[in-house]
Image (cartoon, rainbow, N blue to C red):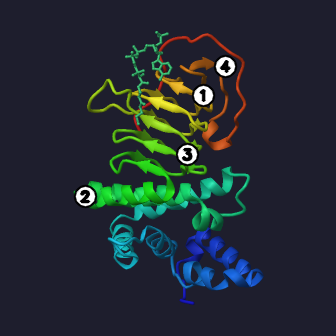
Amino acid sequence: MSSNPSLPGDPLWYAIREQAAAEAEREAVLASYLHATILTHDSLESAIAYHLAGKLDGPTVKAMTLREVFDEAFAKDPEIGRAMRADLAAVRDRDPACGGALTPLLYFKGFHALASHRIAHWLWQEGRQFLALFFQSRMAQLFDVDIHPAARIGHGVFIDHGTGIVIGETSVVGNDVSMLQGVTLGGTGKEQGDRHPKIHDAVLIGAGAKVLGNVHVGHGAKIGAGSVVLMDVPPYCTAAGVPATLHGDCAEAAGFTMDHSLQPSLPFEGDAGVEEDT
Ligand SMILES: CC(C)(COP(=O)(O)OP(=O)(O)OC[C@H]1O[C@@H](n2cnc3c(N)ncnc32)[C@H](O)[C@@H]1OP(=O)(O)O)[C@@H](O)C(=O)NCCC(=O)NCCS
């Protein structure tokens, strides 16, 4: 095991290592896996690069080469590592089925897809679009999550289950957003250019919801499972139904709390008072 001088300043990585060491002790079948994936690494970035490069490995580009791309992205843009820490903490804090940050790091494909997207987005911004699209293609095949590399996604985002998520090219997803399986952030098919949704901070989007067009979903809003949202949603409000209508006057930022309760129905009162783009 390598020494790790950064541990005191990186409590999340420290907790992940502690949990991995405890699990390796408890479950002999997983001991060598946990050592190779977590315990031999000297940083969270190194562990993620090793783990995800192994998952994205294929007949055309091998894990060793992909790991070098991860390492390069982490070295040149420290913000990626910060975003991934916030994403892991978000799953740990918001998913009642998750017993610590080690679990999403090793097992949750929502996190794997988002982490892969963060590398693809970095490549896209660096002008390496074709390699970015390779990452998108591999993660769509492996994790059933299809995020265009140009899509901008904030920190502390929780993609639960992952299966069937589609996020279009000009989408923007803010910080602390939670979304469940089957969510589409797509175009209506009637607009060109900037044609995808803008999801503001701390929004909760329920399973199977489709948010279509360049609409704004305001801070702390909730989108009901299975809804089709075609209009702006004001901050802290709930939109539900096909097509979605507004319900209630929400009080809390739902992305943080994962509160799925539907408020009593209120009439729609006009334009969404949404904030700046993220
Ligand atoms: C149906 C669609 C093509 C628009 O067709 P359109 O004939 O131009 O429809 P309009 O936008 O004028 O809306 C007409 C009515 O249908 C409703 N409507 C539109 N799309 C709807 C949908 N997907 N579900 C339910 N109702 C819908 C509108 O709310 C509107 O209702 P109203 O007359 O009561 O106000 C478009 O909204 C859509 O769903 N496109 C598919 C996009 C998609 O699959 N994107 C994913 C990309 S990854």
Question: Taking 40 as reference, is 246 above or below it?
Answer: above
Tell me where residue 228 appears, x and y as whole percent: 52, 26
Secondary-structure class at tag 2? helix
Is residue 195 or residue 56 the one in the foreground?
A: 56
Residue that numbered label 1 is attached to: 236
| Residue at 55 percent of width and 41 percent of height | 182
Say whether marks 2 and 4 touch (CB < 8 Å): no
The residues tagged by marks 3 and 1 sit, at their Cα atoms, a distance apart of 14 Å
Tell me where residue 99 appears, x and y as whole percent: 72, 62
Secondary-structure class at tag 4? loop
Type of amino acid under label 3: Asp
Q: In the rendered image, is residue 83 in sight?
A: no
Q: How packed is label 1: few (under 14 Cα within 10 Å), some, or many (20 or more)?
A: many
Q: Nearer the viewer, mark 2 or mark 3?
A: 2
The residues tagged by marks 2 and 3 sit, at their Cα atoms, a distance apart of 29 Å
Residue that numbered label 3 is attached to: 176
The residues tagged by marks 2 and 1 sit, at their Cα atoms, a distance apart of 39 Å
Rendered-image quarter of ligand 1: top left
Q: Which mark is residue 248?
A: 4
Q: Earlier in the sequence, mark 3 or mark 1?
A: 3
Type of amino acid under label 1: Tyr
> Which quadrant would the N terminus be assigned to in this image?
bottom right
Q: Earlier in the sequence, mark 2 or mark 1?
A: 2
The residues tagged by marks 2 and 4 sit, at their Cα atoms, a distance apart of 45 Å
The residues tagged by marks 4 and 1 sit, at their Cα atoms, a distance apart of 9 Å
Q: Nearer the viewer, mark 2 or mark 4?
A: 2
Q: Earlier in the sequence, mark 4 or mark 1?
A: 1
Q: Which mark is residue 130?
A: 2
Question: Taking 41 as reference, is 106 above or below it?
Answer: above
Type of amino acid under label 4: Gly
Tell me where residue 150 appears, x and y as whole percent: 33, 47
Say whether marks 4 and 1 touch (CB < 8 Å): no
